[in-house]
Amino acid sequence: MQQSMRCSRGSVINNAMRLGLKTIVYATSLLCPAPSTSAFSSTSTRTFAQERHQNASFTGESASSSLAHLASSPERFAASLNMTIEQVDEAINARRLASTTLNEQLIAIEEDNKEKLTAAEIGRRKHQMICQHRFNHFRNAFVCKMCWTFTPICVCHLFDQRGEGDADSDNRAPLPQGVEKLIVWTHHDEYGRTSNTGSLLPLGLQQTEILMKGLLEHEQIMNEILCRKDVTPVVLWPDKKGKRASTTIADLKQKIAETSSNSQNESNNYGGIVLISIEGTWNTARKMVNKLPPHVLRLDLSEEIRLNFTAPEMNEGIFIDNNVAAASIAAARKNAQSPSAPSLLSPLRRQGKGAKQDCVSTLEATIVALLALGLSVDEAAFMINCARTKVKRIQEYTGKTYPRD
């Protein structure tokens, strides 16, 4: 079995200690959560990333731009963030203060209300506070607020350089006809995680939005959408027990075709399909899906995923990375499993022994569904390649990889 190679927090700190105690702050700041500051905005991050990648590719500079290398020097670390050392210090200290304040508030709300409110209500309020904190401060200040990638290896420029239209025009791909909106319904612990792929969907697709479950303003938006009578909400999640209303790709395509043929009818006020992708671990995602209203249809994509990840001729094989698929498929056959190319996210997320072959990332599952509903192969391939670039850069930057067992 191939050994996992990862850059642990301890190893970075141990290396940094040789260079002085102050360096430890910089060594841990990319690994520990830190807040956003006015000096570090998504706009400045995106601009800096564009300038940086116009001059050099990350693959060629991985040795000098790795986390360990940057952490060994406060000056290099600050420069990679397009910040001064003082601004970095302010961000780190602000993050510590925000975390301390949150912890104090969580303790206070329980002590002050334990005789006034039920345990369930106290828990609900604490969850809202945690969600608001995560939304305001992210998991780490030194992560791009758009693509959720470490700032020095931001991938936003891949989407900015797409197309040749006007700089102010929307160069994102439209959703397939009949699909009105795509929502990435995200667990708060997944929000801002660098190994996340769903964060790239709004960058490349129109009418796409990330909403955090538990954040009041996002909950309100989600509830308004789910209460609309003119749309059909569909969650990308199977109904294996047959207890919930479900649908198929064929049913959705038929509904889209019928709606399109009646589009000239003035009495047709049907809005379209709202696709909901769930972003979280399997356990948290399952709980999130179960809390959706019963009228939300469930869509099982297991067969479409199987075809796209096993058949090179399916959609031009865009889900199969030839650099890693051969070894994975050979191992699957050896263990009497269904041969399948691995998810592009498998190097960053531990899959473990016996992991299911259809465990794919949120982005991959969403693109599979959109392809089946009419998204072009070129647009789908662009999104998949951007996700692969993000994963590769994070691997090189952190030294982290979890090979599939």
Image: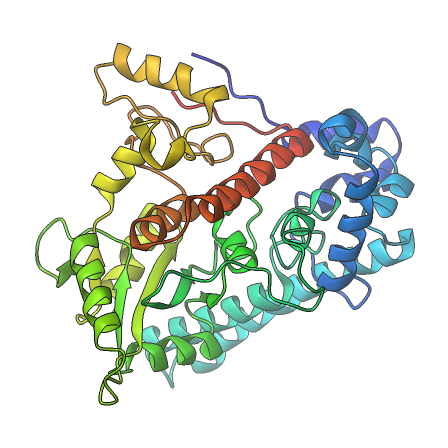
Pick out the residue farthest to the left. Answer: 242
Q: Nearer the viewer, residue 147 or 380?
A: 380
Is residue 42 toward the left or the right of residue 215 in the image? right
The residue located at (26%, 85%) in the rendering is 269
Q: Is residue 316 visible?
A: yes
User: Vertically, is 326 above or below 41?
Assistant: above
Residue 154 image offset from top left, x and y in percent: 69, 47
What colour-coding does the image apply? rainbow
Numbered label tally = 0
Q: Residue at x 88, y 42 (%)?
A: 74
Q: Nearer the viewer, residue 65 or 89?
A: 65
Q: Classify residue 272 by image quadrant.
A: bottom left
Front residue (pair 93, 107): 93
Residue 170 vs residue 123: left or right? right
**Foreground residue, 132 or 232?**
232
Q: Position of residue 304 (x, y in %)?
A: 25, 41
Considering only vertical position in the picture, is 314 above or below 366?
Answer: above
What is the x, y in percent for residue 256?
24, 66
Give me the residue at 54% from left, 39% from top. Answer: 385
**Image location (x, y in percent) of residue 165:** 66, 61
Q: Residue at x 26, y 71 (%)?
A: 260
Which quarter of the image is occupied by the N terminus? top left
Relative to 237, is 179 above or below?
below
Residue 397 vs 131, above or below: the answer is above
Task: Say which quadrant the C terminus sits in.
Answer: top left
Image quadrant where residue 278 sits? bottom left
Residue 61 appears left or right of 367: right
**From where the camera sits, is residue 41 visible?**
no
